[in-house]
Image (cartoon, helix red, strand yellow):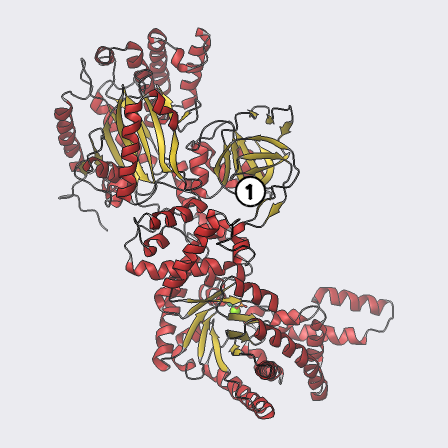
Amino acid sequence: MPVTEDRQKFVYDFTEGNKDLKDLLGGKGANLAEMTNLGLPVPPGFTITTEACKVYLEGGEEPLSMRDEVSAHLAALEERMGKKLGQADDPLLVSVRSGAKFSMPGMMDTVLNIGLSDASVAGLATQAGDERFAWDSYRRLIQMFGKTVLGVDGDLFEEALEEAKHTKGVSTDVELDAADLKRLVEGFKAIVAQETGRDFPQDPREQMDLAIRAVFDSWNGDRAKLYRRQERIPGDLGTAVNVCSMVFGNLGPDSGTGVAFTRDPASGHQGVYGDYLQNAQGEDVVAGIRNTMQLAELEQLDKASYDQLMQIMETLETHYRDLCDIEFTIERGKLWMLQTRVGKRTAGAAFRIATQLVDQGLIDEAEALQRVSGAQLAQLMFPRFDEKATTELLGRGIAASPGAAVGKAVFDSYTAVKWSRSGEKVILIRRETNPDDLDGMIASEGILTSRGGKTSHAAVVARGMGKTCVCGAEELEVDTKRRRMTAPGGVVVEEGDVVSIDGSTGKVYLGEVPVVPSPVVEYFEGRMHAGADDADELVQAVHRMMAYADRTRRLRVRANADNAEDASRARRFGAQGIGLCRTEHMFLGERREMVERLILADTEAERDEALGALLPLQKADFVELFEAMDGLPVTVRLLDPPLHEFLPDITELSVRVALAEARQEAHENELRLLQAVHKLHEQNPMLGLRGVRLGLVIPGLFAMQVRAIAEAAAQRLGSGGDPRAEIMIPLVGTVQELEIVREEAERVIADVEAATGTDLKLTLGTMIELPRAALTAGQIAEAAEFFSFGTNDLTQTVWGFSRDDVEASFFTAYLEKGIFGVSPFETIDRDGVGSLVRAAVQAGRATRPDLKLGVCGEHGGDPESVHFFHEVGLDYVSCSPFRIPVARLEAGRAAALNGTASDSR
Ligand code: PEP
Ligand code: MG
């Protein structure tokens, strides 16, 4: 959308916005406005829109009218607060904070205490009656401003602070007094002057304008870009900027700052969850710099604020009808709300909270389905550590993000990235993490920190990524310089030693702990019942959500399965049939030689003999499969891969023949084989003699398979079964191919029906996996009773990407360049492949209104793709047995979404 500057409004007072304006005001701004309108105690302020940011990012200049709008809003704020920004005797101070549509914790910049200067620091001291506080605030401003706005290396300030503490012989910053801090301010100003060639700006408005610009710029900082790629957040959204009057948590022991959740983001349990830090400001809590106290302890410290906070948390939960997380500050006994948002949660908590909210009557089933995702369900199906394993327990921290992670200990992000690139699994161990650790966190299996609570940077970011994290394991002494960690008993873990961390219990083990299946898989397998005594709340929540999804979904879910064992598992997992039985998987092992004989057959008799040997084996396979799926449809695909896949490797065979010749040994058979291999060798086998083409050039092959299917079905009928076989022809490009195969198949089926006195009701359809098939779907539907979209081959042929090669070769580069956000082999390419699917659905149904439509490519189990298949009106998706629960859930979500307004991220 072109940005029209003229009449656009770029600045909104907190009283003007609401929670639905996240696109424009960012998540933080929209929610500050919502809280303001709810009458909660929010310090007054205003938000500069993401549209202003976009104009700046496009042209390098803020929109012309923005400055005037900021001036007007600042004037109104000053009037309301009864003081002016930076006023010498009583300065209004503001914070300038980033806030994009989607939460990007710690990825962009924030500057607090704007408005302080040499002129106003004394005024602040007088007003607050606290000189130390005023100088501490000033040194924080110079430090934050210097680093984030002026680009000074933050370590220089940290070193100066350490030096000041060292000189004084103290260990924490709260022990520095006003005189020390005053000296530190001089030191900080000198650092700024030396590093930037300019003095720290004394004009408060200049400070504010520069900070706003720095927030805009931070949208394109390396950290933010990396995070967006990881989280698949579009790069063109821009960030809003919130200018908020300051309240102070660092005004003494009756002040402080904290973060809280309305319920436990790790388990979903209701209760008091959060961290509080007395006499602290801003990011001190989440940075894990000092160890925090638990929020429940605030009750003893300041009962009035605590009670008010509890009440506000209840208001917010009821209002947002979801778990909220909040940031608050207490300034001399007065509570202020600084932020709220619908909080991130673990996969398990998402399921529990969704059902709890239904029980509380806050949301309905359709909405509950939007509160969970297939990706979260998949996470819950991962194996867990075996509690009974006797591995050495090194220590325990806070269970911050669940999962079982095993890897080699690394103590810095650089090594984490380097080792993981060379294929090692690593656990990143730090005292605490900060945004610079992001790439190391992405590269690791899990993260372990010795400091910080459930809301520390490590915990928040790991949960967002779905990575295992144990934080605040204080008993473990982490020495990043010497790359080692010491456990209480004196056990030392060096870089490269294997450790296991359990993000569900907080336990840290030495060595590799064996894993056991998750209870959710046990439930799907039928080995645990949701009503059983030992079924935990999670299993019950999953059970209920699956029931909602099954009640709601229109798409049926089938399995890709080639044997009775997979078919039975699929059925236990809720499959409503088999959407793809790849018969080539039935010709592996010793049966490969039988196919070899078929390929080598020179005479009709030899060929009939080979086919005759294969027939009973195929038939037995199908009998088993039809039995396992009795009463449900089973789509059997006739042989698809190029024949050479059944022959020995050409190089190996050539060597064998050459050696036999050299040794003058008999090698007639091998020579024949080699000739056949040469004859069948193709430069581009996936575009060669495969699929329906095989059936057309190898006489009797498809007929044998059709006979096996028909005889197996007849046998099952004879035993009182209910077989529902569907015969599927692969790689059809034109209706003529299908017609020839169809005629032959019908002859064979009629033959079997006559011989067995049965009416088999077999249907015959085709895969749509070539662009030509999709483009001529209207004609193909004349000869097909069903279509199953083979989106693996369709993606390969539409893009011209070799499905076996490209993901390992250049896809990383494509992803990095943003050509696509996810591989088109993983998630359906809606615009390209998807539009062909859509057109083929319409053309196919136009010819044959009762045409049955499904998909059996990998996309059938991919959450986003399932939504697409729902939208285009397929009848079913088919996927591997383990993905069936995910497909069921997503099919339910897709159907529920039509009736629900939802913020689906
Ligand atoms: C497909 O191409 O999508 C498909 C299911 O067939 P295969 O993966 O066996 O080629
Ligand atoms: Mg295929």
Find residue 90 and report its image quarter: top left
Q: Residue at x 65, y 77 (%)?
A: 620
Find residue 716 and report its image quarter: bottom right
- Front residue of 502 and 851: 502
Mark 1 nearby-residue class (10 Å; few <14, some 14–19, many ≥20): many
Find residue 227 and report its horizontal and vertical position in percent.
Answer: 41, 41
Residue 803 can be seen, yes or no: no
- Front residue of 639 and 775: 639
Residue 755 can be seen, yes or no: yes
Q: Is residue 361 left or right of residue 520?
A: left
Q: Is mark 1 within 8 Å of ligand 1?
A: no
Find residue 100 and report its image quarter: top left
Find residue 541 and report its horizontal and vertical position in percent.
Answer: 43, 51
In this rendering, is residue 588 above or below 143?
Answer: below
Find residue 497 and report its horizontal and vertical position in percent.
Answer: 64, 34
Could you tell me which secondary element the residue under label 1 belongs to?
strand
Which amino acid, by three-letter code, is at mark 1? Ala
Query: Where is mark 1, residue-wise?
Result: 404
Find residue 713 and report its horizontal and vertical position in percent.
Answer: 57, 81
Q: Residue at x 38, y 23 (%)?
A: 277
Residue farthest toward the bottom in the current orientation of the protein: 754
Q: Is residue 629 left or right of residue 344?
A: right
In this rendering, is residue 218 above or below 765?
Answer: above
In this rendering, is residue 766 above or below 757?
Answer: above
Q: Is residue 759 left or right of residue 90?
A: right
